Image (tube, rainbow, N blue to C red):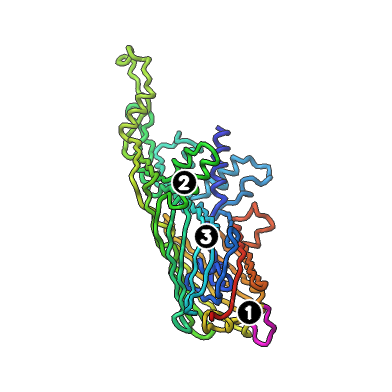
Amino acid sequence: MRLCHCFFIAGVLLTLSLTAQNKQILYDFNEIPQSLSINPGVESDFKWYAGVPLLSGISGYGGSNAISVNDIFANDGIDINIKFRERALDVLTPKDELSTTIQMDYLNGGFRSENPNVFYSFGGYLEFDNIGYWPQDYAYLLYDGNADQLGRRYDLGDLKVRGSLVNVFHFGINKKIDRNLTIGARGKLYSAIADYSSSTNNGHLTNVEGQNNLIASNLNADLLLRTSGLRSLRDANNDDALANEIVSRALFGGDLGLGVDVGFTYHLSERTTVTGSLLDVGFIYHSGDSKSYSLKGNTSVEGIEIDVLDNFASLDRDFWQDLVDEIEEAVPFETDTGSYISFRPTKLYASIRNDFGEPVGNGGSQSCDCTAGSSGGGELRTKYRNSVGGQLYMINRPRGPQMALTGFYMRRIGNVLALKGTYTVDKFSSTNVGLGMNLQAGPVNFYLMADNLLSYNNIAATNYASFQFGLNIISWGRNK
């Protein structure tokens, strides 16, 4: 039993090490071309840019809103089974989210059209998105069993999980309508490599007093798991075959879907700006390698019942198998290869910003041809040395929206360096301080960002940590 406990704890902690990412530092950081990826309506002053392949946008992060690795593995002399029960099993609830989103750009670029008010962007990226909620009653069943739990109702709806590995191709248009308003839209083509979801589960398991035995177990189940692509990846018999299958499904050989991003930037006044964006409004149609598993029905079981007088001649029967067959008949486990549709996790960003201080570049030396006045984008607002504001982030999840609020301060040092500090409050942390840096060395653009800096003295004890970095080549100047 202790070995089972150890395997269960390890599996839980692997899941607890991941959490969904809010790119609050990158949002509205319009010196960085990748800010277009989270607001296609951001103001841009590039003639063109090219992200360095595989290095233009990489992010990684991990965390948990209710427990840290240190809570379980700290060298404090307490047995790990006791710590797991007191700090995880008896603390976490089905509202505690366990999730991750990892994204890597392998192609990213953009260019300005002959109309200097129109900017096009394009690219491709791989995205792994997974979300699950703590399956509280399942955890108690696996860890303790249901013995001595007369009258307790185990909720089978606690199991909610969804994930996908998707290759995304995108093309966007950013247009400056007038001096105050810039809008943008981006179309997306999804090519799914793998997908799984089990988020509509219902039912219960309850122990009550039996009529022919001490205990009767009542099972009412309506469980469904949908998958696509997993069989193809599982059946690959070597690393080369697995790599070929992944590439094939990523390049239109998998399940296809469509999506759209929209966004805007609007100046309320010379120094006050509001922005907003809605990302991944889309779906994927799964049909190529889909398989669903369902368990639906209800039954009441009082264990193996043997009447010695009636069954004396057949006591060598497998009564256990008879019980299993009875349960499977009442609550059948079925599979289906029909197609299904999954919707992407839609995200919402919004912000308000106030600029103050001296204009950037006025009266100082220019280290690169990248001022607002020399842009290929026509007349742009003046950039100021300081900005302060607030941001809102929301993402659609199976148990309702997940939200975060961010306050930020930005400081520009000439046209070479820009720094952005953030303070974010969400369900994962109330002390999340982040810092982002953008460095412009001639045409070379480099950015680096990190979250929850106060926790870096002990990563194992933190509930959240993340980083982002990228490398681009940028060109400024008027179109002739």
Choose mark 1 or mark 2, whichever is in front.
Answer: 1
What residue appears at the point 45 percent right and 49 percent down from the top-left corner?
249
How far across and how far down the image is residue 104, in percent?
A: 55, 57
Task: Judge whether 412 appears above or below 86 on screen.
Answer: below
Task: Give yes or no for contact between labels 1 and 2 (Cβ–Cβ under 8 Å).
Answer: no
Identity of the residue furthest to the front in this view: 480
Which residue type does callout 2 highlight? Pro
Q: Tell me the quadrant of the picture where the N terminus can be found.
A: top right
Task: Judge whether 270 appears above or below 100 on screen.
Answer: below
Choose mark 1 or mark 3, whichever is in front.
Answer: 1
How far across and how far down the image is residue 173, in percent?
A: 45, 71
Residue 469 left/right relative to 281: right
Spatial CA distance of label 1 from label 2 is 56 Å
Does 67 lie within the magenta span? no
Which residue type does callout 3 highlight? Lys
- Count of numbered badges drawn on the protein: 3
Identity of the residue furthest to the top in this view: 313
Residue 143 left/right relative to 340: right
Residue highlighted by disc 3? 427
Q: Secondary structure at mark 1?
A: loop
Task: Judge whether 311 appears above or below 245 on screen.
Answer: above
Give the magenta-colored segment's residue range. 361-367
Q: Earlier in the sequence, mark 2 or mark 3?
A: 2
Q: Residues within 10 Å of mark 1 (few under 14, many from 20)?
A: some
Residue highlighted by disc 2? 135
Of 158 and 295, nearer the camera is 295
Residue highlighted by disc 1? 369
Spatial CA distance of label 1 from label 3 is 43 Å
Q: Tell me the quadrant of the picture where the C terminus can be found.
A: bottom right
